[in-house]
Image: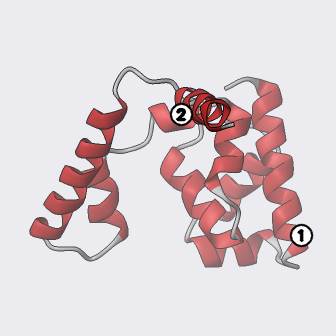
């Protein structure tokens, strides 16, 4: 990510933290992330912050991770862990449950292979025009 993107994320996180009335120490306690790392994040020091830590900060502050993704223009999604790794780390699921989730995600991915995010918008517009 660029320095400007890092600064924008830092400002967004700092604003969300202040809106909750939290200090950096409180955010550290709520997210389980060190005070020092959070301070550097808010000051735009990290050009490649760990996506899992960004998500933990966003969760703690009730910030939609999509807001971060929009700032970094897709760069965060490219470095996220696999579905299996994410669900194993985030939730206390059995191997069978994780297998089912992973299979569902793969089905969705197969249905959307080769399409850009805007393809479904275009198809919906076309369908609407046909109906009119």
To which quarter of the image does residue 56 belong?
bottom right
Q: Which residue is at a point 62% across and 38% down the rendered structure image?
A: 131
Q: Could you tell me how many numbered marks the image carries? A: 2
Q: Residue at x 50, y 37 (%)?
A: 77
Above or below 41: residue 95: below
Residue at image location 55% in from the left, 37% down from the top: 76
Could you say where residue 40 lies in the image, as x and y percent from the top left?
Answer: 74, 47
User: Which picture quadrant has residue 8?
Assistant: top right
Q: Which of the 4 quarters of the picture holds residue 114?
A: top left
Looking at this view, is 127 or 78 the one in front? 127
Label ID, residue 32: none
Circle 1 packing at 10 Å, graded few (<14), some (14-19), many (20+), is few
Kind of element beneath mark 1: helix
Which residue is labeled 2 in the image? Answer: 120
Tell me residue 101's x, y (percent).
24, 59
Q: Where's the C terminus, which quadrant?
A: top right
Whether residue 119 sits left or right of residue 95 in the image: it is right
Question: The residue tagged with tag 2: helix, strand or loop?
Answer: helix
- The residue that disc 1 covers is 18
């Amino acid at each position: 990510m660029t320095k400007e993107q890092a600064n924008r994320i830092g400002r967004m996180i700092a604003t969300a933290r202040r809106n909750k009335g939290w200090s950096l120490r409180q955010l550290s306690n709520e997210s389980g992330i060190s005070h020092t790392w959070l301070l550097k994040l808010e000051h735009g020091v990290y050009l490649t912050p760990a996506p899992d830590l960004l998500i933990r900060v966003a969760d703690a502050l009730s910030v939609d991770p999509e807001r971060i993704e929009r700032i970094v223009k897709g760069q965060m999604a490219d470095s996220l862990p696999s579905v299996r790794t994410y669900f194993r780390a985030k939730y206390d699921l059995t191997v069978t449950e994780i297998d089912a989730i992973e299979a569902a995600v793969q089905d969705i991915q197969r249905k959307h292979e080769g399409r850009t995010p805007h393809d479904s918008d275009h198809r919906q517009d076309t369908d609407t025009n046909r109906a009119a």
